[in-house]
Image: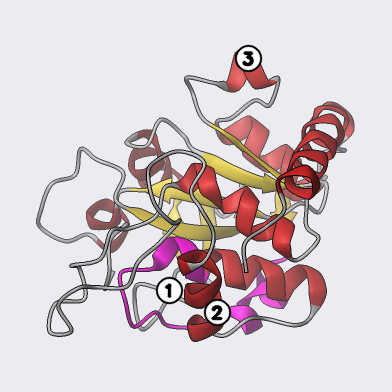
Amino acid sequence: MKNSRLTVRAVAVAALLSAAVAGLGGGIANAAENSHGRYGDPDQASQYWVRQTLDDCSLMATADVIGQLTGHQPSEDEIVKLAGATPSAHHEGVVYLPPSNPGDSDSGNGTDSRDLPILLAHYGIGAVYTDDDVADATNVPTGMAALERVLGAGKKVIAGVNAETIWDEDGDRTVGDHDLVVTGVDTGDGVVHLNDSGTDDGADEQVPIKVFEAAWATSGHDMVITN
């Protein structure tokens, strides 16, 4: 994914992912709506924001979530090392390799968001990936209503978005090219709260709901949800 924008045992990962799917099915169905239209805890989450230095937004979002849930946030070096030693479940090779050209922070291989539950499992965190194409098959809904429900239930969310739309920059606004942590939704104020490692002002970054929805739609509303 965009900039400025060790191995996990298979049995343990499978067990955690299975538990995550089961837990999410119930959590989404039963989460109570906040009477004030506020979901999540962006103030608490903002302390775990860290600026990325590589093309590793997905990994930094993962480290952010680990910090929120365990209180012990891996450094950028630590999460990059883990991803570099963990086989991908969705492409040949490891989950992530750093930039091949030290002068070009975008020259790495990026990260497939579907691999993030594997990294979270290394820290004992169950999680599941969903998007528009797999939501029915996984029984894990996506979209704004689902996002509000999981945040209201205290779960953590990593979402794939279009960075240019979020940052209001020129460029291709048709593709999902950036991962970040969605820390809250406030329907009263009409904003989505984010921890965005790709910008200097990324701690509790706030964007209008319509802007977030447009940016998120480019990835097919992909998100990784913790259990």
Q: Which residue is mark 1?
A: 197
Q: What's the mark number on residue 101?
A: none
Q: CA distance from mark 1 to mark 3?
A: 31 Å
Amino acid beneath label 2: Trp
On screen, residue 89 versus residue 187, left or right, reads left
Judge whether 24 appears above or below 191 on screen: above
Q: CA distance from mark 2 to mark 3?
A: 33 Å
Residue 205, visible in the rendered structure: no
On screen, residue 210 versus residue 190, left or right, reads left
Q: Are marks 1 and 2 in contact (CB under 8 Å)?
A: yes
**Residue at (62%, 62%) from the top-left corner?**
7
Amino acid beneath label 3: Ala
Q: Which residue is mark 2?
A: 49
* Residue 92 in the image, given as x and y percentages of width and height: 37, 44
**Residue at (12%, 84%) from the top-left corner?**
103
**Residue at (10%, 57%) from the top-left corner?**
170
Q: Quick one: 144 or 7, which is closer to the camera?
A: 7
Q: Is residue 83 magenta?
A: no
Q: Which residues are magenta?
A: 40-60
Q: CA distance from mark 1 to mark 2?
A: 7 Å
Q: What's the mark number on residue 137?
A: 3
**Residue at (36%, 83%) from the top-left corner?**
200
Name the quadrant of the N terminus: bottom left
